[in-house]
Amino acid sequence: MNNFTSVIEYPVTQEVEILSDDERESYRESIKTMLKRENAALVAHYYTDPEIQKLAEETGGCVADSLEMARFGSQHQGKTLIVAGVKFMGETAKILNPEKRILMPTLEATCSLDLSCPIDEFSAFCDEHSDHTVVVYANTSAAVKARADWVVTSGIALDVVDHLEAEGKKILWAPDRHLGHYIQQQTGAEMLLWKGECIVHDEFRATALRELIKQYPDAAVLVHPESPSSVIALADVVGSTTQLISASKNLDNQQFIVATDMGIAYKMNQFSPEKEFIAAPTGGKGATCRSCAYCPWMRMNSLKLLANVMHNTENEIIIDAELAKDAMKPLQRMLDFSSAINQV
Ligand code: 13P
Ligand code: SF4
């Protein structure tokens, strides 16, 4: 494993600001007007505030996982994309659409995985293992992507690594060690793992989950693979956000224990209003829990910031053109691979 040991300061997850009905309606209207005027699309991740997900749906934008967000941006005709999510999602949109203007409610919304993988240390790690194929998770900076052979999201990581394993490749994986470990187990691939983690998923606890399963013996357990292996071992379904939403829709169970950011419950409830979605246990407030199943950076995307997105002068994603070109190659490889496997 790598030796990255810097201590990273994380923000505390903020409560969603309570707005009066009038305030909410006024923000909603100004956002809709702005999107129309700018011929812009709102692309939101499943973890954002349900109000933002609803607006993206109502305005012809997209609510999706990180893979689908990347695809949608490339297909949309408009010149401006407003990405509600975290910074790597905005950067991915810019890399794939250099001619478009990419704005975000705030560029402060980042990701612990991205922070855990600074380019200098990562590059040195790659140099030490130059006989390995470098596969990085989408939750990384443009510079880290540019150093990689492949970029993957959780929705496609297993397929890509399976493919590389069949070709006899040794893999250097970064930055999520839990996801890397899961993929290693599933595919049997030879993998060197970077030592990063998602602070949200890393907080799910297996002992408390076992107790919850006893309380809800008929519930299906849905787990995102950024969770620790002891939590993944208790899952009925392990998958990306989209895969977990599909499972909640397609399984007959009436109750689900969900180990991921609970912003996802908006979509799960929309598809299955009669079903019950219970958050998997974390360390708990006052114990070790920093996020309690809500990503602090996703929570920074507020209706207020979104309404002001055109007036903010410091929220456009800018990436050096040469760097973007290098980062585009492994990203495009993922999108091409995804199209190819979906056609067979
Ligand atoms: P998905 O690719 O499943 O949307 O996950 C992104 C993410 O940040 C999970 O924490
Ligand atoms: Fe990053 Fe975790 Fe937040 Fe996803 S939930 S954006 S992996 S910190």
Image (spheres, grey):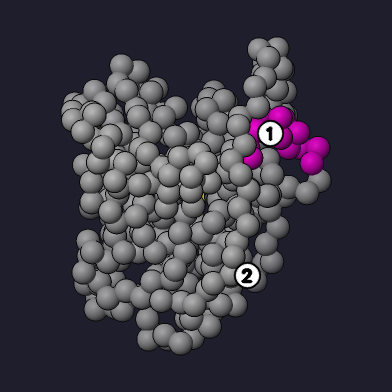
**In front of the other: label 1 or label 2?**
1
Give the Cα distance between marks 1 and 2.
28 Å
Density class for disc 1 (Cα within 10 Å; few <14, some 14-19, many ≥20) is many
Q: Which residues are magenta?
A: 300-312
Q: Residue at x 71, y 30 (%)?
A: 304
Instruction: Tell me, yes or no, whether the highlighted magenta stretch contains residue 191.
Output: no
Query: Foreground residue, 27 or 68?
Result: 27
Q: Could you say which quadrant of the image residue 210 lies in?
A: top left
Residue 305 in picture, x, y percent from top left:
71, 35
Quadrant assignment for the N terminus: bottom left
Query: For the point 60% across and 61% down, which residue is it?
Result: 8
Residue 298 percent coordinates (x, y): 57, 42
Residue 126 appears in the rendering: yes
Residue 306: mark in rendering: 1
Q: Which tag, 1 or 2, sits closer to the chain's start?
A: 1
Residue at the location (21% across, 33% down)?
214
Above/below status of 62 relative to 66: above
Q: Quadrant of residue 134?
A: bottom left
Badge 1 amino acid: Leu
Against 26, residue 68 (above or below) is below
- Mark 2 element type: helix
